[in-house]
Amino acid sequence: MATRLQNIWIFTRLFNKEIKNLKNCRSATTTSSGAILPEPRKTPFGLIGIVFAVIPGLLIGANISKKIANFLEENDLFVPSDDDDDDD
């Protein structure tokens, strides 16, 4: 029990030291000397790349789900009943 408490105490001390060492610096936009970094490079064809990634994914997913639904229906694991369509 004592060793667990000691480990927890040591961890919290180390964690608090790391937090105290952090200063208000925005290293993502400035260098260590304070100079502003250049703009990040832009990916060409960003929207077209997204379209070429999403469309095939949707088509492949639809095809897989269609094949699984056919397999389930052929093996009588899931057969939709015609009674569900009646709204009388």
Image (cartoon, helix red, strand yellow):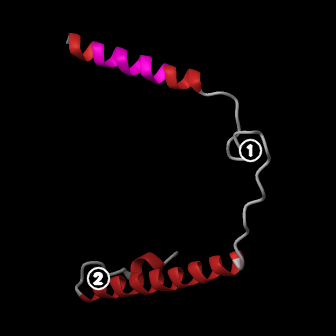
Q: Mark 2 highlights which residue?
A: 72
> Taking 50 as reference, is 64 left or right?
left
Please state which of residues 39 and 4 is positioned toward the viewer in this rendering.
39
Question: Earlier along the polypeptide chain: callout 1 or callout 2?
Answer: 1
In front: label 1 or label 2: 1
Does 15 appear in magenta? Answer: yes
> What residue is rendered at 22% in x and 10% in y?
2
Q: Main secondary structure of the magenta part?
A: helix
Circle 1/circle 2 CB separation < 8 Å = no
> What residue is rendered at 20% in x and 12% in y?
1
Q: Mark 1 highlights which residue?
A: 30
Residue 72 placement (x, y as % from top left): 29, 82
Image position of 16 with respect to 67: above or below? above
> Could you tell me the amino acid type at mark 2?
Leu
* Image quadrant where residue 26 sits: top right
- Residue range in magenta is 6-16
Residue 82 placement (x, y as % from top left): 40, 83
> What residue is rendered at 30% in x and 85% in y?
73
* Image quadrant where residue 13 sits: top left
- Other residues around mark 1 within 10 Å, as few (<14) / some (14–19) / many (≥20): few
Please state which of residues 43 and 82 is positioned toward the viewer in this rendering.
43
SS of the residue at dot 1? loop
> Taking 20 as reference, is 42 left or right?
right
Does 88 appear in magenta? Answer: no
> What residue is rendered at 72% in x and 66% in y?
41
> Could you tell me the amino acid type at mark 1?
Thr
| Residue lying farthest to the top in this orientation | 2
SS of the residue at dot 2? helix
Image position of 81 with respect to 10: above or below? below
